[in-house]
Image (cartoon, rainbow, N blue to C red):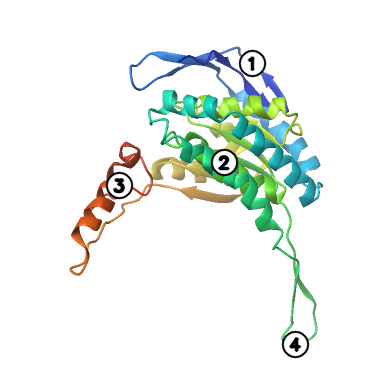
């Protein structure tokens, strides 16, 4: 299956990169190209930052009800395009069609669950011990968020970022992995088709030293979140020091699988096989030691 040429989604528009650069996306099953994408560079990253800043000015002023309506509209559009998105994940990442449902499910659940969760957040008055001051805890959108995603769950990772960002009033720049960007770029097409407010979500990918470094070092983002290696996390932390940013990272781990003497061995073995070989073992919480 081929997916043609996919453009970046910045500022509500589907666009070429400033440099007109393109890159092939390779199917891991046979090593053949299945799509071309617009490859972002430094100028595109800067354009996305400005677009996200403008998007935040609008989105942060929207009521939770307005944000919820848009998120549910996107949710329905994702479900309408389920087959296309699942197929993209199969060909760009290599998992089975059945397994790709987990990615779709994560997105549609996040677009519904997070705005519902926001309904339970309230400004809170906090008693003062000395009764001399008034303390109030208030909820405010953090600002522009930048999300760097891993290749193994292309849309599940998007769901885990886009849900809380949009529900809380933040705008978002999504940088999918260069190895599996098609489904994210297709999501950009969906956002464009439903006329989602411009600049609130932006999607692009390209060489990390040109794209990620530019965005992380910028003063515009208030939040940087990533899924990746510990080494990459250290680099992101160093690059982010140009301004005070909130950092949220899921980095490398070493997960043990412990079977106690009173455990049912058959159940333990079934679970062990699942957590070790599910998604071909390419899972952040896959067991490393038994």
Q: Are marks 1 and 2 in contact (CB under 8 Å)?
A: no
Name the spot of residue 282 as percent of width and height, x first.
Answer: 35, 39
Which badge, 1 or 3, is on the more N-terminal residue? 1
The Cα–Cα distance between marks 2 and 4, rounded to whole angstroms, is 47 Å
Residue on which the image places disc 3: 274
Please state which of the two labelled residues, at mark 1 or mark 4, is closer to the viewer. Answer: 1
Task: Tell which of 29 and 247 is nearer to you.
Answer: 29
Residue on which the image places disc 2: 107
Residue occupying the point 77% across, 43% down: 59
Position of 152 relative to 28 (above/below): below
The Cα–Cα distance between marks 4 and 3, rounded to whole angstroms, is 56 Å
In the displayed structure image, the side of residue 212 where residue 290 appears, left or right = left
Position of 117 relative to 144 (above/below): below
Q: Quadrant of residue 46?
A: top right
Which badge, 1 or 2, is on the more N-terminal residue? 1
Residue on which the image places disc 4: 130
Residue 16's disc number: 1
Residue occupying the point 66% across, 36% down: 76
The Cα–Cα distance between marks 1 and 2, rounded to whole angstroms, is 26 Å
Name the spot of residue 165 as percent of width and height, x first.
Answer: 65, 46
Please state which of the two labelled residues, at mark 1 or mark 3, is closer to the viewer. Answer: 3
Q: Are marks 2 and 4 in contact (CB under 8 Å)?
A: no
Neighbor class of circle 4 (other Cα within 10 Å; few <14, some 14-19, many 20+) is few
């Amino acid at each position: 299956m081929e997916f043609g040429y996919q453009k970046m989604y910045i500022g509500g528009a589907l666009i070429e990169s400033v440099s007109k650069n393109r890159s092939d996306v390779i199917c891991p099953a046979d090593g053949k190209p299945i799509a071309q994408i617009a490859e972002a560079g430094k100028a595109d990253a800067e354009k996305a930052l400005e677009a996200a800043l403008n998007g935040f000015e609008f989105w942060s002023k929207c009521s939770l009800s307005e944000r919820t309506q848009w998120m549910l509209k996107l949710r329905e559009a994702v479900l309408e395009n389920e087959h296309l998105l699942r197929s993209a994940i199969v060909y760009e990442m290599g998992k089975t069609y059945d397994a790709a449902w987990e990615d779709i499910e994560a997105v549609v659940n996040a677009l519904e669950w997070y705005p519902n969760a926001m309904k339970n957040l309230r400004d809170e008055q906090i008693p003062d011990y000395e009764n001399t001051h008034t303390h109030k805890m208030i909820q405010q959108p953090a600002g522009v968020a930048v999300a760097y995603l891993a290749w193994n769950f292309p849309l599940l990772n998007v769901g885990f970022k886009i849900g809380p960002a949009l529900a809380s009033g933040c705008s978002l720049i999504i940088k999918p992995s260069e190895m599996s960007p098609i489904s994210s770029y297709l999501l950009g097409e969906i956002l464009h088709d439903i006329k989602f407010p411009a600049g609130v979500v932006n999607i692009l990918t390209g060489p990390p030293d040109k794209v990620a470094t530019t965005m992380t070092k910028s003063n515009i983002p208030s939040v940087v979140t990533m899924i990746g290696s510990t080494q990459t996390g250290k680099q992101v932390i160093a690059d982010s020091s140009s301004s005070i940013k909130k950092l949220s990272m899921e980095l490398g781990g070493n997960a043990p699988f412990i079977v106690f003497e009173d455990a049912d061995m058959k159940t333990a073995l079934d679970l062990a096989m699942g957590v070790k070989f599910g998604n071909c073992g390419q899972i952040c919480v896959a067991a490393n030691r038994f």
